Image (cartoon, rainbow, N blue to C red):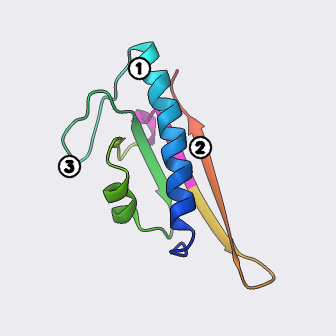
Amino acid sequence: MINRNLLPVVMMLLMSVVAIAQESVSVNGKAGTDTIAEPKKSDAINVFLDCERCDRSYIRQMVTYVNYVNNRDEADVFIMLTNRGTGGGGTEVIISFTGLKN
């Protein structure tokens, strides 16, 4: 699980990328095509979140203006979080954002 102290940083990065992608989606006139149990947000982008040891429920609660999809191929943005221990006893978190559609 990602350290709770890092969650604000992760959330800020996620919101920044989603805001940039949202602008791109609205300019291109595209909207997401699939969601999971939540109601469809027609102006929102589709996000596939891949994180091994993160609190997905917390992220979905805090970032509600995107459509989370279960299939990476249906996503507009693929977000992958990885973490590992450092030599000094800390944690290194790597967040990769990949745009999947134009």
Query: Where does residue 72 sit, x and y in percent of width and height?
Result: 45, 41
Q: Say whether disc 3 or disc 1 marks the residue closer to the N-terminus.
A: 1
Within-10-Å neighbours for mark 3: few <14, some 14–19, many 20+:
few
Query: Where does residue 28 sit, x and y in percent of width and height?
Result: 45, 14
User: Which residue is painted at 53% across and 32% down in the image?
Assistant: 20
Q: Say whether disc 3 or disc 2 marks the residue closer to the N-terminus.
A: 3
Q: Which residue range is magenta in the image?
A: 72-80
Question: Residue flagged by tag 2: what amino acid is it?
Answer: Phe
Q: Quadrant of residue 99?
A: top right
Question: Residue flagged by tag 1: what amino acid is it?
Answer: Ser
Per the rendering, the mark at residue 37 is: 3
User: Which residue is painted at 21% across and 47% down in the image?
Assistant: 38
- Magenta span includes 12: no
Q: Of circles 1 and 2, which is in front?
A: 1
Q: Helix, strand, or loop for circle 2? A: strand
Within-10-Å neighbours for mark 2: few <14, some 14–19, many 20+:
some
**What's the CA distance linking mark 3 and mark 2?**
23 Å
Query: Where does residue 91 sit, x and y in percent of width and height?
Result: 68, 75
Q: Residue tagged by mark 1?
A: 26
Query: Where does residue 86 sit, x and y in percent of width and height?
Result: 76, 77
Q: Say whether disc 1 or disc 2 marks the residue closer to the N-terminus.
A: 1
**What's the CA distance linking mark 1 and mark 2?**
19 Å
Question: Residue flagged by tag 3: what amino acid is it?
Answer: Ala
Q: Residue tagged by mark 2?
A: 97
